[in-house]
Image (cartoon, grey):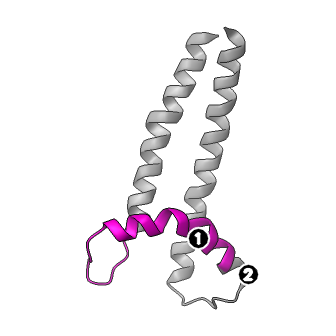
Amino acid sequence: MFLIGNLLNAIAGMLDIILHIYIWVIIVRVLISWVSPDPGNPIVQILYRLTDPVLEPVRRRLPDVGGLDISPVVVLLAIFVLQKFLVASLFDMARILR
């Protein structure tokens, strides 16, 4: 059972790192959107490609808030819930199986 525990521990660790990185990607995208970036800039294009698949469905479901885009806030809250619930649960399961 310790092998499964170690595997769960590794998966939880990787998922935690990926979620942390994605949080920063969303934050950078929000900050860059405040300065009207050049859409041809490769960094801006990468940020949009990384975040649009997650932000667009949330934008479609949210009501109009006077032109204010709150989809990054909703996605960040969802990521925090994933970290506190899913990642923590995986770490706990891994600890139990060791």
Q: Mark 2 sits on what residue?
A: 42
Q: Tell me the quarter of the picture where residue 13 sits.
A: top right
Q: What residue is shown at x 59% (from left), y 50% (from top)?
A: 20
Please name whichever residue, 63 or 65, is drawn nearer the observer in this view of the structure: 63
Q: Mark 1 sits on what residue?
A: 28
- Residue 55 is situated, as x and y percent measured from the top left of the image, at 47, 66
Q: Tell me the quarter of the picture where residue 9 sits.
A: top right
Tell me if mark 1 has few (under 14), some (14-19) or many (20+) residues whose alpha carbon lies within 10 angstroms of its own. few
Q: In which quarter of the image is the N terminus?
A: top right
Q: In the figure, is residue 58 to the left or right of 14?
A: left
Disc 2 to disc 1, C-alpha distance: 14 Å
Q: Is the magenta stretch mostly helix, strand or loop?
A: helix
Secondary-structure class at tag 2: helix
Asked if marks 2 and 1 touch (Cβ < 8 Å), the reply is: no
Task: Residue type at mark 2: give it.
Answer: Pro
Please name whichever residue, 36 or 53, is drawn nearer the observer in this view of the structure: 53
- Residue 78 is situated, as x and y percent measured from the top left of the image, at 42, 51
Q: In the figure, is residue 59 to the left or right of 14?
A: left
Q: Tell me the quarter of the picture where residue 47 sits.
A: bottom right
Residues in magenta, as a range = 45-70
Q: How many labels does the image show?
A: 2
Q: Does the magenta stretch include residue 64?
A: yes
> What label sits on residue 49 in the rendered view?
none
Q: What residue is shown at x 63% (from left), y 88% (from top)?
A: 39
Q: What residue is shown at x 67% (from left), y 16% (from top)?
A: 4
Please name whichever residue, 53 or 28, is drawn nearer the observer in this view of the structure: 53
- Residue 71 is situated, as x and y percent measured from the top left of the image, at 40, 67
Q: In the figure, is residue 19 to the left or right of 62?
A: right
Task: Residue type at mark 1: give it.
Answer: Val
- Relative to 26, does residue 9 appear above or below in the rendering? above
